[in-house]
Image: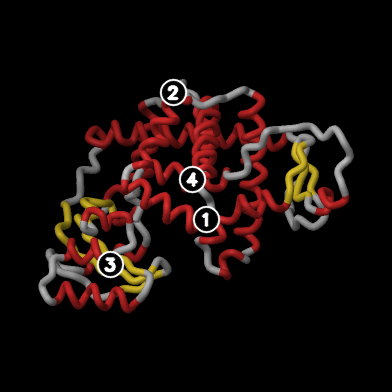
């Protein structure tokens, strides 16, 4: 389920940024009573509406159940994310970060394939956004990405001693990794899953059934996920490890829908020797240090910013 096309990942990751890349303007006239009533927060003099906050959270809320959506900790986290993104986007505008229009057009053109158009159609329907809005969303995502890249930088030093300490921390996790070749079908409706399983039992190839019934991205490949680290996938995928090689599961329900798994092969654990994993560990630790650097920058920006909350935001920030 994590194996989706790169461009779709970019858009999904940037959904939280939609409508949050403002053409910053200073208030030259006093806000109307309606604007005041609709204000969610004022950041560095920029008045941001409740409507913009609702747009920001629309995707996150659409993929959460009611209990999670109303969880106080989740609500607080979304509000904090919203504040941080608006501050970062203000900074991007201030620094004059732009998009390479030629490369951007190449990305847009890639959506004109049959597969791309199909994905866009489903995406537009889910979020009630047209293609022009999605293009703008992608543009915004690229710009904010450039800002974060500049913050992360590329002058991060990692000593041999640090790498060995990191290796010891990761060792148990690495030893627990299970890599398996899995085919997968997921449907929204139990009836569809029952029909799919019935066909498989009748001898119809799993791949053909997956192409017809599955709603997951890998349906285009006959439900074939290839070799994956099962521990990096949702918990439900561990059901595949209870199967024998070549065996097909029954219908397994999860929060994502109704699943059918086929275990093609389980790969032996790779070596957890330090020298063998050194390059991989270096890259991972490098990424961790970059993330920490970005987080420190965001926290510093938050502390420096003037943030004025309206009385009814319910936000507990300062």
Q: Earlier in the sequence, mark 3 or mark 1?
A: 1
Circle 3: is it few (<14), some (14-19), or many (20+) Cα within 10 Å? some
Cα–Cα gap, marks 2 and 3: 49 Å
Per the image, the residue denoted by label 1 is: 127
Residue 238 location, quadrant? bottom left
Circle 1: is it few (<14), some (14-19), or many (20+) Cα within 10 Å? some
Q: Are the residues at dot 1 and dot 4 in contact (C-beta closer than 8 Å)?
A: no
Per the image, the residue denoted by label 2 is: 157
Cα–Cα gap, marks 4 and 2: 42 Å
Q: Are the residues at dot 4 and dot 2 in contact (C-beta closer than 8 Å)?
A: no
Q: Residue 274, how many percent across, how many down?
A: 26, 36
Q: Are the residues at dot 1 and dot 2 in contact (C-beta closer than 8 Å)?
A: no
Circle 4: is it few (<14), some (14-19), or many (20+) Cα within 10 Å? some
Per the image, the residue denoted by label 4 is: 131
Q: Earlier in the sequence, mark 1 or mark 2?
A: 1
Per the image, the residue denoted by label 3 is: 213
Residue shown at 38% from the left, 35% from the top? 109
Task: Give the tally of numbered discs.
Answer: 4
What kind of element bears circle 1? Answer: helix
What kind of element bears circle 2? Answer: loop
Q: Earlier in the sequence, mark 2 or mark 3?
A: 2
Residue 176 higher or lower than 155, as above or below: below
Is 205 in front, or is 41?
205
Residue 2 higher or lower than 298, as above or below: below
Residue 230 location, quadrant? bottom left
């Amino acid at each position: 389920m994590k194996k989706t096309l790169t461009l779709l990942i970019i858009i999904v990751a940037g959904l939280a940024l939609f409508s949050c890349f403002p053409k910053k303007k200073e208030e030259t006239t006093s806000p109307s009573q309606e604007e005041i009533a609709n204000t969610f927060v004022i950041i560095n003099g920029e008045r941001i509406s409740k409507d913009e906050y609702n747009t920001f959270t629309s995707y996150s809320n659409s993929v959460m159940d009611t209990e999670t959506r109303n969880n106080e900790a989740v609500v607080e986290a979304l509000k904090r994310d919203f504040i941080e993104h608006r501050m970062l986007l203000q900074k991007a505008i201030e620094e004059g970060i732009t998009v390479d229009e030629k490369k951007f057009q190449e990305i847009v053109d890639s959506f004109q394939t049959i597969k791309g158009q199909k994905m866009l159609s489903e995406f537009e329907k889910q979020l009630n956004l047209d293609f022009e809005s999605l293009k703008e969303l992608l543009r915004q995502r690229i710009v904010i990405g450039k800002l974060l890249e500049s913050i992360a930088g590329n002058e991060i030093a990692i000593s041999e001693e640090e790498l060995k300490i990191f290796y010891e921390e990761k060792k148990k996790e690495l030893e627990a990794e299970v890599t398996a070749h899995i085919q997968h079908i997921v449907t929204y409706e139990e009836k569809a899953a029952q029909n799919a399983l019935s066909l498989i039992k009748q001898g119809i190839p799993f791949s053909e059934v997956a192409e017809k019934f599955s709603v997951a991205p890998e349906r285009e490949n006959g439900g074939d996920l290839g070799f994956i680290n099962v521990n990096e996938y949702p918990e439900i995928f561990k059901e595949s490890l209870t199967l024998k090689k070549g065996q097909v599961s029954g219908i397994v329900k999860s929060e994502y829908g109704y699943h059918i798994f086929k275990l093609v092969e389980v790969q032996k654990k790779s070596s957890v020797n330090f020298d063998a994993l050194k390059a991989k560990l270096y890259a991972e630790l490098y990424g961790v240090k970059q993330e920490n650097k970005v987080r420190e920058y965001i926290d510093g920006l938050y502390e420096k910013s003037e943030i004025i909350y309206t009385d009814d935001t319910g936000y507990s920030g300062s």
